[in-house]
Amino acid sequence: MNKLSIVNEGSGRFIVDGDLTFQTIDKKTANGFAFLKTAKQITMDLGGVGNADSAGLALMLEWIKQARHKKVQLHFKNIPEQLINLAKLSGLSSLSYFNPDAETNIDKPKLA
């Protein structure tokens, strides 16, 4: 188990390092959305994530929800395959956040 840390690289860039699992996500992490106040466009690099489970996916969904509420564009890069697969199993693969083939991982409203 690798402890989870979120490192502010500046200019709206953050590196998520460690495991995104039930064991590593605590209340402080789950309720910590201060990073969403740092810029109007945030990039979360998940390349440093070792292990991930459904708690990691739930945390990402909460980040997405809070970003939308605060009108912040949230972009994920280097999403681990474990989380991509969980998103697919959960029916979330249609969201561009979890689509590694999307040109940008910013969820945009679909036009009718």
Image (cartoon, rainbow, N blue to C red):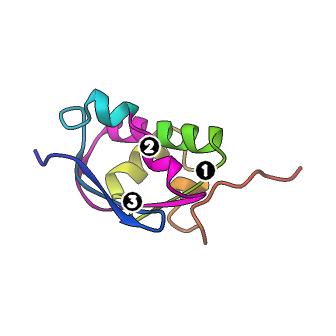
Question: Which residue: 54% across, 43% down?
Answer: 64
Q: Residue furthest toward the top?
A: 27
The residue indicated by pointer 1 is 95
Picture layout, residue 7 above or below residue 20: below
Question: Which residue: 48% across, 63% down?
Answer: 12
Q: Position of residue 5 (x, y in %)?
A: 24, 50
Q: Residues within 10 Å of mark 3 (few under 14, many from 20)?
A: some
Q: Is residue 43 left or right of residue 45?
A: right
The residue indicated by pointer 3 is 79
Question: Which residue: 20% across, 38% down?
Answer: 24
Q: Position of residue 25 (x, y in %)?
A: 26, 35
- The three-letter amino acid code for the residue at tag 1 is Leu
Q: Nearer the viewer, residue 91 or 56?
A: 56
Q: Residues within 10 Å of mark 1 (few under 14, many from 20)?
A: some
Mark 2 secondary-structure assignment: helix
The Cα atoms of the two marked residues, 3 and 2, are separated by 21 Å
Q: Which residues are magenta?
A: 32-60
Q: Is 111 a magenta residue?
A: no
Q: Position of residue 100 (x, y in %)?
A: 50, 65
Which comes sooner in the sequence, label 3 or label 2? 2
The Cα atoms of the two marked residues, 1 and 2, are separated by 24 Å
Picture layout, residue 55 above or below residue 35: above
Q: Nearer the viewer, mark 3 or mark 2?
A: 2
Mark 1 secondary-structure assignment: loop
Q: Residues within 10 Å of mark 2 (few under 14, many from 20)?
A: few
- The three-letter amino acid code for the residue at tag 3 is Ile
